[in-house]
Amino acid sequence: MSTKVQIEKETYILHGIVLLSALGILIFCFSSGIGGNDFWWHVKAGEYICKYYTVPTKDIFSWVRFEVEIPWIAHEWLSEVIFYGLFRFLGVMGIFWFSLCAAVLMLVLLWNQAKPYLQDNIVISLAYFCFFSIVAVGFFYGRPHIFSFFLLFFELKFLYSFYENDGGKSIWFVPLIAVLWSNLHGGSSNLTYLICIMFLLAGMFPISFGRLESKRLSKKSLMKLGVVTLCTMGGIFVNPIGVQVFLFPYINIGDKLSMIYVSEWHAPDVKDMSQLLLYFFPILLISMGLIIGKQKIQCIDLLLMLFYVYLFMRSVRFILPWFIVADFYAFRYFPEWKVAKIKAKSEKIAATVFLGILGVFCLVGIVKTAKTLQGGSVVKQVMTQEAIEAVRKDNPQRLYNDYNFGEALIHAEIPVFFDSRADMYAKTDVFADGLSLCTLKGINKEGDSVTLDVEKLIDKYDFDAFVILKARPLYVYLTSHPEKYQLAYEDEELGYFRRLE
């Protein structure tokens, strides 16, 4: 019997514990349903594309588009078509199962990638995968970035295989990944060639300095990687929109207003206990592994780690990609902390019982998920159907809507003032004016504070109705002026007002 087979027989229980623990947590976290943020307008965009066989270049959902030109870089068009197809034929259940299965598949891919190293430090490995499962539920739902996670994983797999073996044909799949990325989630497709450039830089020079080292690739491999990098950059242009997808991420970085006010673009908050535990602690754990470990640190691993930590520090949405990237390098640096081999009969029984408990935990998650599915509330709604119907019945022509309600109104085919596509509205005054009215704080397109005249701003767009969260300052303003604004509908979350003038 080979050594490899012997190792597998001695460690398969530990591998099972890691996978089942993470899987049980993942299913349990999904059992309450998934987020619906942005999903509904993605579905309507996909419907529009399928109906008219064209990718929109201007806004198609707001009433204000007839007065202000609002350009739209629909860089996620292919994802929207897929989501529309899923929703049309399988409904919200299809979106839920798609999100859950995608999360499970990603977990299994990461586990399989790290499997050769798991037994070296089962404690930290278990912690990593459990943290991943908890974080994953906040990112695996009906949004295009799901596809980016898998494209990132396979690009790293192909590039690491090429780099570590100094060659290989799988590297030619990377430009294809760029093509898919630019159509599925073009807003982050620039990462494809930036990662290639990092591998190219790491392979150019032989480095040996302290614990830091880097091997130089052969001239043939460097030439091949250089060509792949150029093809990858070119692959981003293969989409219905063209060069705009390539420039889109860099333009957005300069959008100060969106960076300040769009929550998912915010930097992480160390004062938030949940972020401290679920985001900062795993990063610290992996970083400590590199620092206190005895192995040589490969330059490419350090480059990728620093790059994705930097992206995370700029925007909290990069925490899941950080987990994916860390899976390719982190485990080899963990200090050894092996669990004693399971030999005695009592130990095997105890391990089997523990696996059984994990299996029961998975089963509990499955049962809880089934109950959620039975109730039909698997995708969280930002507005109740009753609230949507109240607005629809009134049929306002110039509705002011809360920024967060845009997607629900779009899906109900009610024209909106603005919605969560901040990159579009920020190019005009619409986003700044909408936020100013919502918060009752004057803001311009640069994100600077300006003087606010509420009634003047309302007159500017001649709003005839308002649907707003009760937590917003605008809600307080409207309720305090009943002679001008009539409360026509309210629930626990929001109020709908008619303008009387």
Image (cartoon, rainbow, N blue to C red):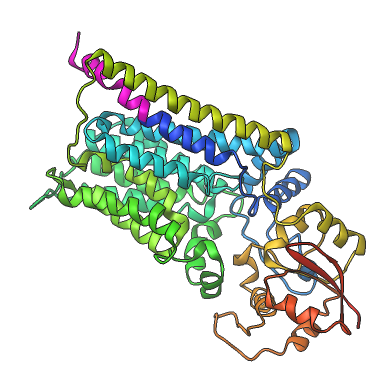
Say whether residue 366 is left or right of residue 485: left
Residue 352, position in %: x, y?
A: 36, 19
**Above or below for 333 versus 314:** above
- Direction from residue 194 to residue 426 in the image, left or right: right
The answer to whether residue 227 shows anywhere in this view is yes
- Residue, x 79% and y 83% (percent of image)? 480
Q: How many marks?
A: 0
Give how far across and how far down residue 491 sits, in percent. 79, 62
User: Is most of the magenta stretch helix, strand or loop?
Assistant: helix
Whether residue 391 is in magenta: the answer is no
Q: Quadrant of residue 1?
A: top left
Nearer to me, 99 or 73 = 99
User: Among all residues in the image, which is located at the extreme front?
Assistant: 346
Report the side of 405 relative to 358 (left or right): right
Q: Is residue 55 above or below residue 341?
A: below
Q: Give above or below for 236 relative to 97.
A: below
Q: State the quadrant of the C terminus.
A: bottom right
Residue drawn at point x = 36 percent, y = 57 percent: 280
Q: Nearer the viewer, residue 108 or 49?
A: 108
User: Which residue extends farthest top?
Assistant: 1
Between residue 220 and residue 342, name the one nearer to us: 342
Q: Which residue does the image show at 67% across and 45% down from the upper left?
A: 379
Q: Residue 383 falls in which quadrant of the image?
A: bottom right
Answer whether residue 174 is visible to the viewer in this image.
no
> Residue shown at 35%/50% (left/top)?
195
Magenta residue span: 1-17
| Residue 500 location (% of width, % of height) | 91, 80
Residue 2 is inside the magenta segment: yes
